[in-house]
Amino acid sequence: MNQATQAFHGGRLSEAAREFNLPRESFLDFSSNLNVFSPSIRAADWEQWRSAISRYPEADAAGIRDRLATVYRLPAHRILPTAGSIDALYLAARLFSKSKAAIIEPAFADYTRAFESAGCQPVRLALPRESWYAPASEWAPLLDPFDVVVLGNPNNPTGAFQPREQMAQLFNHSWARPKTWLVDEAFIEFVAAQEDETLLPVLQQYPSLIVFRSLTKSWCIPGLRLGFLATENSAWLGACRAMQPPWSVNALTEEWAATFLTPVRHNQLLSGLAELREIKKRFHRALAEIPGLCVHPSVANFLLVELINPSLDASQIYRELGLRGYLIRVCDSFHAMPKSRFIRLAVRTEDENTQLTNALSKLARRDSSIARIPSEIVPEAHAEIVPEAHPEIVPEGLPEISRGRKPPVPSKTGPSPGGAAEPTFRPISA
Ligand SMILES: Cc1ncc(COP(=O)(O)O)c(C=O)c1O
């Protein structure tokens, strides 16, 4: 790894402002997955918090830890507050620098970067695309040679999700080598019934499990930097705490937490996310109407969109939308994803989603020579989908798993391009 570079992320507003010669504030940012329905901060609150920048926060963030413990119903000794979940990830990676680590890909790029920065060379296990939305039990056989497994649940960028029951099966499997599990739940608050799915309440049963949580996405506070690491393993937690610099959680965040990090506010936030899920469904349907696009199912607040018409190109769409003030995430930087074929779109307000859908639709339809390819409507959540638009895409360097299974072709708009009969698919509620 080039130690000087950062992984590529969404939310590159300053870069976009330079690239498209538009003011930073003028963009509708669909490239970073923030909850646009999060509660706004009152002017009076800001006024009250002003003085926070001229004082030190608590060195060990003990006050925030206690608040997190109350809100997430965990004993405080299982929690380490961190500067975003990214801080938790980088601390935890340092515990396993000598281990054989596997990262389930495609995934958030910093899983790899964190391990590499800790001196570990993780193996990037590129799931074949027909396994992206499959239950973990299908790809579990790949994990046997490893000591540490890192995965995002929900996964970014696919939006796939492994229910707790699947995760339990994975943990309880009789592995030839015992495993440590690092599970990133940065997007779990967007999952319906997230309280039944998060691994936080079952930490005690799995002492070799570390969970990362982020407050960034659901509360829309990327600038504040707040997350936490949770584990039953006190030696790991203690080691992370010992490595963490003092004052990692800043004083403004302390002020924010005093107002917002309460069980009542948290429950209000979670209830508000039900509305977001409805908006996502409508956004999904509208996008799926656009010829040449296939919208994949997602439990998170973003949608992975595949450009199944070969005349559509992700970077070109990015540029054309950027010129019109819409910022989207091209997925070319994600490991194990075919280049120029995928974009990721955050779910924003109904009106903003419609604006983007219209702009995207115009682009997709502009060239009348573009053959109409039936767009696909796929069900919410981790259904057994995966359209066969690119049967030629070969999974990167992986043993043969799931290749025997032919994925169903979900379609509500008629026969598939190959003329296959109307398929069936199995939605799994999330
Ligand atoms: C999957 C995933 N995990 C973790 C993070 C980091 O979140 P935070 O802002 O809490 O550090 C991100 C940020 O984009 C992410 O996409």
Image: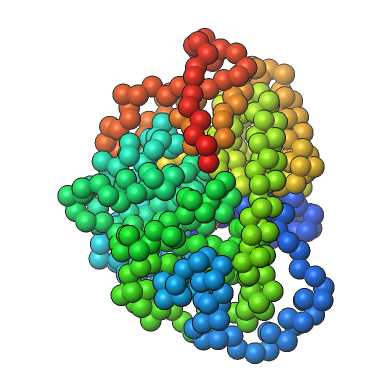
In this rendering, position of residue 190 left or right of residue 54: left
Q: Is 361 drawn above or below residue 331 in the view shown?
A: above
- Closest to the observer: 429 or 348? 429
Residue toward you, 409 or 320: 409
Most extreme residue toward the bottom, as rendered?
Answer: 55
Looking at the image, the residue that sits furthest to the right is 43
Residue placed at 56% from the left, 74% from the top? 67
Q: Left or right of 312: which side holds 405? A: left
Q: Position of residue 377 (x, y in %)?
A: 60, 26
Q: Residue at x 17, y 49 (%)?
A: 176
Res 89 → quadrant: bottom left
Instruction: Please tell me whether residue 317 is drawn above or below residue 407 in the rendered image.
Output: below
Looking at the rendering, which quadrant does residue 189 occupy? Answer: bottom right
Toward the viewer: 179 or 324? 179
Q: Is residue 22 visible?
A: yes
Residue 335 visible in the picture = no
Question: 18 or 186, which is in the foreground?
Answer: 186
Compared with 112, 65 (above or below) is below
> Residue 154 location in percent, x, y?
49, 48
Q: Position of residue 118 (x, y in %)?
A: 35, 68
Residue 75: % across, % down: 44, 72
Residue under the image location 57 percent in, 20 percent down: 411
Q: Residue furthest left?
A: 176
Q: Residue at x 37, y 55 (%)?
A: 150
Q: How is the image coloured?
A: rainbow
In the picture, the quarter occupied by the N terminus is bottom left
Count of numbered circles in the view: 0
Report the side of 14 relative to 130 (left or right): right
